[in-house]
Amino acid sequence: MYNKIGSLPIPLQTPQELDSLDALASAGDVNETPFNVFIGHNLGHRVFTMSVPFRKFADISAVANNRDAGPVTQRALDEGHAKKLALYMVKGLVSAAKLRRAAQGKPVPEAFDEVLRKLGEQPYFSLQPLVCNIRDVPPGGTGGGGIRGIRLETSTGETAAFRVFLAERHILWVVDGQHRRHAADLVMTFLEQVRQTGRYPGKGAVLFQEKGKAVTEGEMLVWNEAYEAARSYATLTIEVHLGLDIEQERQLFHDLNRLGKRVDPSLAFQFDGSNPITLFIKRKLAGDLRMSVIESEVKDWSDDEGALVLKEIVAVNAVAFLNKGNIAGATPAVIEPREDKVFHLWSRIAEIPDFGSHRAKEKTVAAQPVVLKALAKIAYDLNFSNRRPEDADDLYDRFLHELTSVDFSHSNPMWRYYELDESQRLESGLKGLEEYLPEAVGSANRDIGAYQGDLFRFGAKHNDIYPILADMIRWAIKLPNRRDA
């Protein structure tokens, strides 16, 4: 498929004997690092596959996202995304250190499990291969400027791998993986700071919940061995393309990042064994409460069997636990102490008349996810908000006690408040509700849904609607107006 030089495939070249100044000059670089690689052909193009110690990758690679430094072949770095990856990597390194102890027959101190519990355990850890390009080498044709290499053979003469010698000029330009590269840098900064100061960072590389606290003796053992894992046996796998120009790098970046199909959210949540909120749903709601959870939404309400769509129930719990629209960043340290309160909420929701029954959406608006988000919002405000009132525990007990008495029927005029005029509101017994609701200012969305054919269907803009519904339910239960707090 490609030419070769002697017994070596291009772009590898036979090592020179560096026994003169002329040979040194022609070699170009003396400071070389050996790597064992496998040679493959990705859709016919020659590539190296190599493993690099976790810590070393940043030293031998670069990212072309600085317009002042040359042609750009990368998007701008997203610090938030990189930090999420860094948290994952820290967990992976601690798990790697724990696995190594077990493989060596050493006892595993309890501190390993405690640190993993705080970080968030999961069944398995792995990082997908990074994709890089070494510029200014022949991609597969003839010519100089190649990479020094030797063939590694078995005792029977079969090729086992190749050993290549990467010089300082052989920069691995990252095509896919700049966030993993930056995340690895954050991890090493965190581990070095913890080991040097004996305290957890209070700002900057904050990758553990105990911000600013002293590191215990047991925890220091964990971090030292995680650091050793990053320096030695925990590796990153890299697919190295050879001699691509700028246009080809950009095309490869596009193809790797745009041609893949995203995993359906419900399937992702179903497979994810790491996030504490998804574990809460599986263990407590589907398990203890035996709620039926499905992957796809039933479009026709007449076919509704009362099951909850997984991605919707995840979103509801994101509000209840975190007051957020998603569960990214949820850690066991935050979620586990809150589980009892949220579980009590779901226990009462399950007792709402017709909830979870056949054709539940036609019988009660409580089966619509936006209403559940409203209940979750009240639960968060009374339990975990920094602005929770002094008597929040009593108010939450009252909320749970009165919840099943709220009229969640489709015909309740409260849902149609914004469709009614003032006289209709008074006739419907809605006097005083306006004090609980936000003022109609500017272009604020007050179109919360529509009442048609004896069914009230709430709108799709949940983030606009569920805070209003939460205020309505507060008024119905006679909880204090949150605007008076």
Image (cartoon, helix red, strand yellow):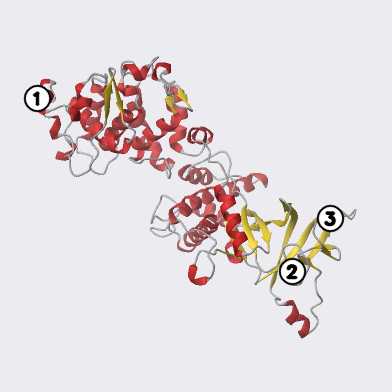
Quick one: 95 or 169, which is closer to the camera? 169
Left or right, residue 81 beside residue 321: right
Badge 1 crowding class, 10 Å Cα cut-off, few under 14, some 14 to 19, many 20 or more, is few
Label 3: which secondary element: strand
Q: Are marks 3 and 2 in contact (CB under 8 Å)?
A: no
Label 1: which secondary element: helix
Q: Which residue is mark 2?
A: 146
The image shows residue 235 at horizontal and vertical percentages of 63, 54
Label 2: which secondary element: loop
The quarter in which the N terminus is drawn is bottom right
In the image, is residue 3 above or below residue 311? below
Of the residues tagged 3 and 2, which is closer to the observer? Answer: 2
- Residue at 53% x, 38% y is 263
- Residue at 65% x, 66% y is 135
- Residue at 57% x, 38% y is 123
Q: Which residue is mark 1?
A: 423
- Is residue 55 something one can see in this rendering? no
The image shows residue 171 at horizontal and vertical percentages of 63, 67
Quick one: 234 or 219, which is closer to the camera? 234
Q: Mark 3 or mark 1: which comes first in sequence? A: 3
- The picture quadrant where one finds residue 361 is top left
Q: Mark 3 or mark 2: which comes first in sequence? A: 2
Residue type of the residue flagged with mark 1: Ser
Report how far apart the C-alphas of labels 1 and 2 lie in the structure: 85 Å
Q: Which residue is mark 3?
A: 159
Of the residues tagged 1 and 2, which is closer to the observer? Answer: 1
Left or right, residue 137 beside residue 231: right
In the image, is residue 140 above or below residue 359? below
In the image, is residue 116 above or below residue 220? above
Q: Which residue is the extreme one toward the bottom? A: 21
